[in-house]
Image: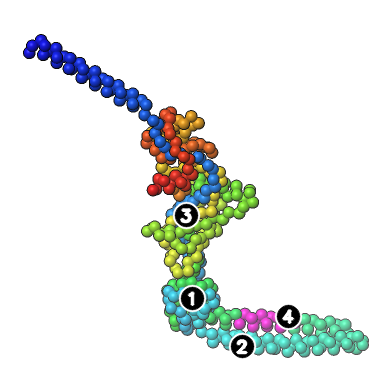
Amino acid sequence: MTAHSRSFLRGSFLAAGVLLLSAYSSLAQQAGQMPPPQVTVVDVKPETVQLTYEYAARISAYRQVDVRARVGGILLKRNFVEGAEVKAGDVLFLIDPASFEAVLAQAQAQLQQADAQLNQAQREEKRNINLFDQNAVTQKARDDAISTRQLADAAVASARAQVQTAQLNLDYTKVTAPVGGITTLEQVSEGSLIGTTGDTGLLTSITQLDPVYVNFSFSDTQAAEVRRLIDLKKAKGEAPNLGVKISFGDGTTYDHDGVVDFTSSTIDASTGTLQARAVVDNPVRRLLPGQFVRATVTGVSLDNAITIPEVALMQSPQGQFVYTIDKDGKAHVNPVTLGQKVGGNWLVLSGLKAGDRLIVEGIIKVRPGAPVQAAAAATPSDANKVVQN
């Protein structure tokens, strides 16, 4: 290669290097002048939110009653189909009434006799009082007549009580349903001798299934929180009631809501929970005793609460945080402490205050302390719609 050729190549490489350096400098300058990322911002506004608490629950019968004989005798008849529904007052069993009818007749006869003796004693009393007033009999005779009438009064009262007792025993030969519900298998068959003590008097059981109870347990911390929120409402003159919504294992919901009617006054030391119970209508017997369901407690609200969309929430090794924008348009990291989820939002217990400008979209481009270009402010509900679309 000649000296001229080497000089030409050296000049070409130098020119190419200058061009590359110039292009790199131009790109670096353009990168340094890139505009701030565009983000969507909402203003943090406190509001009243409805809180819910979900628990595993179990159904139990509203009432389960043993049907027992109150008098002994031979069981003549069963008037229901085992496992069928009966109404309160229905005659379920008939015990042989013959002996009780005889006892009633005897008591009625004794009452008639006592009435006759009372009438006689009243006439004797009246006669002796009149004679005493005429000084025809002694005071003792008058007093004896009064005492005889009083004894006759007591005899009549005793006889009436005997009639009432005999009538009750006769009525008890018709064993009626104390409550409405579903019957179990009969314990004693027709023709058996019925007693009144121990299991000899047990005839069947009735389970009332409308309404039913829903049993669940609050944790001690949640119980304290619910009680505190209810007390705040009561201090304002409001009277909140705790309701319960029922859902099944397949995710379907029950079409009747319940009302909490009992909470225990003590915490179970072994589980650290507080027993609670709700009552719910069960007209078509969809809920059965022993069935497991999910119970969602409603009726508790929190005033001046701050909620944020889930899309605004970020996670770091130090915990959860969100980005906010200051008055200079720069992004800042705000660590937050969250409560429960409320719909599509999260309840913020600490880390945000009213008036903060929260970034809800374009977060991936944001850098702490760097400026951002905020879009027109929107409400949290509008922000949710944007994300969903």
Q: Which mark is residue 121?
A: none
Eye-nearest disc, 4 or 1? 1
Q: Residue furthest left?
A: 1
Q: Nearer the N terminus, badge 4 or badge 3?
A: 4
Q: Nearer the N terminus, badge 3 or badge 2?
A: 2
Q: Decide if residue 312 is on the left or right side of residue 146.
A: left
Q: Is 370 within the magenta?
A: no
The residue range painted magenta reads 153-167
* Residue, disc 4: 154
The quarter of the picture where residue 5 lies is top left
Instruction: Name the residue: 49% across, 54% down.
Output: 297
Q: Nearer the viewer, residue 67 or 3?
A: 3
Instruction: Name the residue: 56% across, 52% down.
Output: 265
Tag 2's secondary structure?
helix
* Residue, disc 2: 105
Position of the N terminus by quadrant: top left
* Residue, disc 1: 86
* Residue, disc 3: 296
Eye-nearest disc, 1 or 3? 3
Q: Decide if residue 368 is on the left or right side of residue 327.
A: left
Q: Nearer the N terminus, badge 4 or badge 1?
A: 1
The CA span between labels 4 and 2 is: 20 Å
Tag 4's secondary structure?
helix
Q: Nearer the viewer, residue 270 or 320?
A: 320
The quarter of the picture where residue 18 lies is top left
